[in-house]
Amino acid sequence: MQAMAVEIERKFLLRDDGWRAHIVSSRALRQGYLSVDPPRTVRVRLVDDHQAFLTIKGSRVADRRPEFEYGVPAADARFMLDHLCRRPLIEKVRHHLDLESADWTVDEFSGDNAGLVLAEAELPEGRVLGQLPGWIGQDVTADDRYANAALQVTPFAEW
């Protein structure tokens, strides 16, 4: 059985701040997890305090995982984040970059994950990530510690 939606994503640490020259927009994200069971995670995300999503993800295999995302009312998301989600919440600013090789974002975490900065390249099916920008460091796609659900369980501050 094939999933209806598949996320293809690579994650990287950064060598320097060279990525900042490519920022086209930034959004504040607050997210929490209703489930962090490895075969399935259920996340609530509030974007800039007015747009909200419920996301269900399956297990990652290499750089792919099934992902289903649905819009929800912001008031519902606020309630779930404040009363139903596991602690700590994930707080970060997501910067969207103007690079054409993939849909590039950089997440700057705060709260219990302060100090962590990750770049992500999301790719459409059949596309290969070409030459990486010079500010890209180690590929941590296969290191589950960097998954947001894992950062909720064991925040970066505890590493």
Image (tube, grey):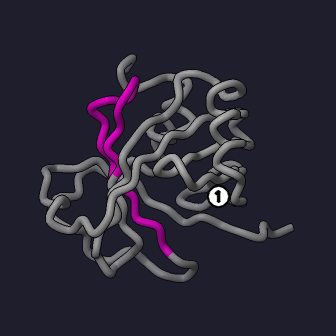
Q: Residue furthest right?
A: 1
Stretch of the chain drawn in magenta: 107-123
Q: Nearer the viewer, residue 104 or 9?
A: 104
Please tell me in which quadrant of the rendered image residue 8 appears: bottom right
Whether residue 43 is visible: no
Q: Nearer the viewer, residue 109 or 100?
A: 109
Q: Is residue 159 above or below residue 72?
A: above
Q: Farthest residue in the top direction?
A: 158
Residue 111 seen in render: yes
Drawn side of residue 82 relative to residue 129, left or right:
right
Q: Is residue 38 magenta?
A: no
Query: In this picture, is 37 found above or below 67?
Result: above
Left/right placement of residue 53 relative to residue 116 reads right
- Total marks shown come to 1
Who's the residue at 41% across and 71% down the image? 103
Residue 25 position, x and y percent, is 32, 64
| Residue plotted at (59% across, 61% down) | 64
